[in-house]
Amino acid sequence: MSKKTTDEKKEIMRRDMRHRRKETDPSWILKASERIQHAIMERDEFTKAQSVGCYFALPYEVQTRLIVKTCWDQGKRVCVPAFNETQNRYELAWLSSLQETKSRRSNIREPLVINRAGFIDTDLIMVPALAYDPQGGRLGHGGGHYDHLLGAWSGIKVGVCFHFQIFEQVPMDTHDIPVDIVITEQKAYTKNGFINF
């Protein structure tokens, strides 16, 4: 497959998924997000983790507040992406309170005080995307920010999305980083197959 063909397929899929997500009923998003969050928190990978990488969800993404709260209730540390203006890329920063945040780049919330987290300090990270496939292939927004984050990652990568965002195969380039597990409101996809909820 040529690079041009891969890029064209990615853009077509991105346009379709952006439209479908924005057309999705907000109440359904909340209900499906709750199911996804519970499915994540029931997994051994989450139970054993001492520190968790998460993200602040936009209204049409899989929501994450329940996961963040549960992490704190269980004594786990939480980090989220924070944009480094100097480096022009996202890094991970520890999150101490949902109140101590502000909207920054692309209206995504970040900690008010950036206390950078190292990859070695985090056991598991949740990764949003516009689309996934059952093998862990991921289609992001095209900025390469998560590929940069995940490229140095040695922990467990959990892809989260709604089931309508699952495709048989997501177009991938050599620099695109797949995840280890993909969880939707209907199934969990792993290297060993899938589990229905």
Image (tube, grey):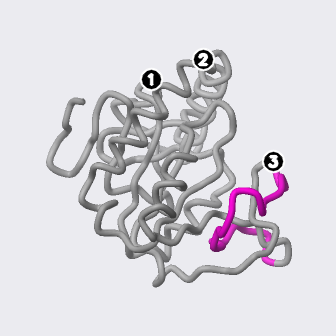
* Residue type at tag 3: Ser
* Residue at the outermost left position: 192
Disc 2 versus disc 3: distance between alpha carbons?
20 Å
Q: Is residue 188 above or below residue 95?
A: above
Q: Give the residue pinned by disc 2.
A: 24
Q: Quadrant of residue 101?
A: bottom right
Tell me how many marks there are.
3
Q: Quadrant of the C terminus?
A: top left
Q: Earlier in the sequence, mark 1 or mark 2?
A: 2
Extent of the magenta region: 87-106
Disc 1 versus disc 2: distance between alpha carbons?
10 Å
Q: Looking at the image, which is closer to me, 175 or 153?
A: 153
Q: Give the residue pinned by disc 1.
A: 164
Residue 169 visible, this orientation? yes
* Residue type at tag 1: Phe
Magenta stretch holds residue 73: no
What label does residue 33 carry, if any? none
What label does residue 106 carry, if any? 3
Q: Quadrant of the N terminus?
A: top left
- Give the structural element (helix, strand or loop) at label 1: helix
* Residue at the outermost front position: 73
Labelled pair 2, 3 in contact (Cβ < 8 Å):
no
Q: Is residue 150 above or below residue 173?
A: below
Bin the neighbour count of mark 3 within 10 Å (Cα to Cα): few under 14, some 14-19, many 20 and up.
few
Give residue 147's position: percent from left, percent from top: 55, 62
Residue 174 visible, this orientation? no
Q: Earlier in the sequence, mark 1 or mark 3?
A: 3
Q: Looking at the image, which is closer to me, 2 or 166?
A: 166
